[in-house]
Structure formats: structure tokens, C-alpha cells
Image (cartoon, grey):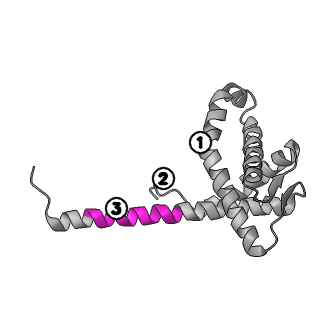
């Protein structure tokens, strides 16, 4: 095995740096998509309230709530799905809406702990909010395709 030349090493480092930058940008875009989905659900449903006084504060709160929601969906949601897998299969996946509603209620509870001024009023509001967020997120994520899912056209 021959040692790599310094230009090969610099090229590999540059490629990793570019890949890291792209991954960060994609993460930010997904956070913004989540915030937009939460904003639309907040706007449509009277049971989801945002009580920030200024527009800038509302944007900040929605970004923080989107971050909380994203972390919960990445960590807690798979655990819920694992333990409720038989119920998910029995309902042909419809129970995932209930899990998403629970994630929304948990996000609301955590937002209350941090005094963010974003609240979900009840389970059925959370179910409707979860449906709206899922639809809006799906539509927005269509424009953010996964780079690891390469298609051969």
C-alpha cells in the first residue's frame, strides 16, 4: 500500500469539509421546514397558541419549538414506535398519528417548562396538529431530497 500524496489528502479533507457544510445546511433547512409546519398548524388550529409579543420573538419561539420537536422525534418517537409496533401494525400505521400527537403534547409540555409561550390545548388538537404537521412536512421535504438516496434516472 503506497502512502497518499499530500494533494490526495488535501482533496479528501476538502471533500469532507464540503460534505459537512452541506449536511449542516440540510439540517438548517429541515429545522426551518419543521418550524414552518409548526407555524401553519399554529395558524390553522385555535387550540395551538403562540403568545410571543413580537414577530421576531414568534419566529424565535417557533425555531426553538421546532428544535425541541425534532429532537423528540429523533429520540423518543422511535422508542414509542418500537413498544407500540403491534398496535401500529394492527391499525395499518394509523396509530403513528397518535404517537405524533403525543410528541406534539410532549413538545408543548417542554415549551411550557422553558416558558416559550407555545401551547397545545388537549389531545384532539394535538391529533389534528400532528396531521397538519405531517402533511406540511411531507410537502416541504419533497423539495429537500435525501442525498444518500441516489436515484439512477
- Within 10 Å of the Cα at label 1, are there few (<14), some (14-19), or many (20+) other Cα atoms? few
Q: Please state the horizontal and vertical placement of residue 48, each as a whole percent of the image.
A: 85, 56
The image position of residue 10, as x and y in percent, is 23, 67
Front-most of residues 131 and 23:
23
Element on which disc 1 rests: helix
Query: Of callouts 2 and 1, which one flags the residue occurring earlier in the amino acid sequence?
Result: 1
User: Residue 72 lies in magenta, yes or no?
Assistant: no
18 drawn magenta: yes
Which range of residues does the magenta coloring cover?
A: 12-26
Task: Tell me where residue 47 sits by quadrant.
Answer: bottom right
Where is mark 1, residue-wise?
75
Callout 1 touching callout 3 (CB < 8 Å)? no
**Crowding near the residue tagged with mark 2, few <14, some 14–19, many ≥20 C-alpha atoms within 10 Å:** few
By secondary structure, the bulk of the magenta-drawn segment is best described as helix
**Which numbered disc flags the more N-terminal residue, 3 or 2?**
3
List the single residue furthest toward the bottom: 55
Of the image marks 1 and 3, the number of the one nearer the N terminus: 3
- The front one of 113 and 85 is 113
How far apart are the two marked residues, 3 and 2, measured between alpha carbons?
19 Å
Along the horizontal axis of the image, is 47 left or right of 101?
right
Judging from the image, what secondary structure is the residue with disc 2 in? loop
Closer to the eye: label 3 or 2: 3
For the point 69% across and 67% down, the residue is 60
Residue that numbered label 3 is attached to: 16
Identify whether 101 is placed above or below 92.
Answer: below
Amino acid at each position: 500500500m503506497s502512502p497518499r500524496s499530500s494533494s490526495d489528502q488535501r482533496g479528501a479533507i476538502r471533500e469532507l469539509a464540503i460534505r459537512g457544510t452541506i449536511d449542516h445546511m440540510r439540517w438548517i433547512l429541515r429545522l426551518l421546514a419543521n418550524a414552518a409546519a409548526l407555524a401553519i398548524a399554529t395558524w390553522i388550529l385555535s387550540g395551538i397558541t403562540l403568545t410571543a409579543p413580537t414577530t421576531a420573538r414568534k419566529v424565535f419561539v417557533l425555531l426553538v419549538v421546532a428544535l425541541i420537536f425534532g429532537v423528540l422525534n429523533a429520540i423518543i418517537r422511535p422508542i414509542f414506535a418500537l413498544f407500540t409496533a403491534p398496535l401500529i401494525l394492527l391499525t395499518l400505521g394509523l396509530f403513528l398519528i397518535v404517537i405524533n400527537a403525543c410528541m406534539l403534547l410532549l413538545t408543548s409540555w417542554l415549551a411550557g417548562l422553558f416558558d416559550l409561550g407555545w401551547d397545545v390545548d388537549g389531545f384532539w388538537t394535538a391529533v389534528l396538529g400532528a396531521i397538519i404537521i405531517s402533511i406540511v412536512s411531507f410537502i416541504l421535504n419533497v423539495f429537500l431530497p435525501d442525498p444518500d438516496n441516489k436515484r439512477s434516472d
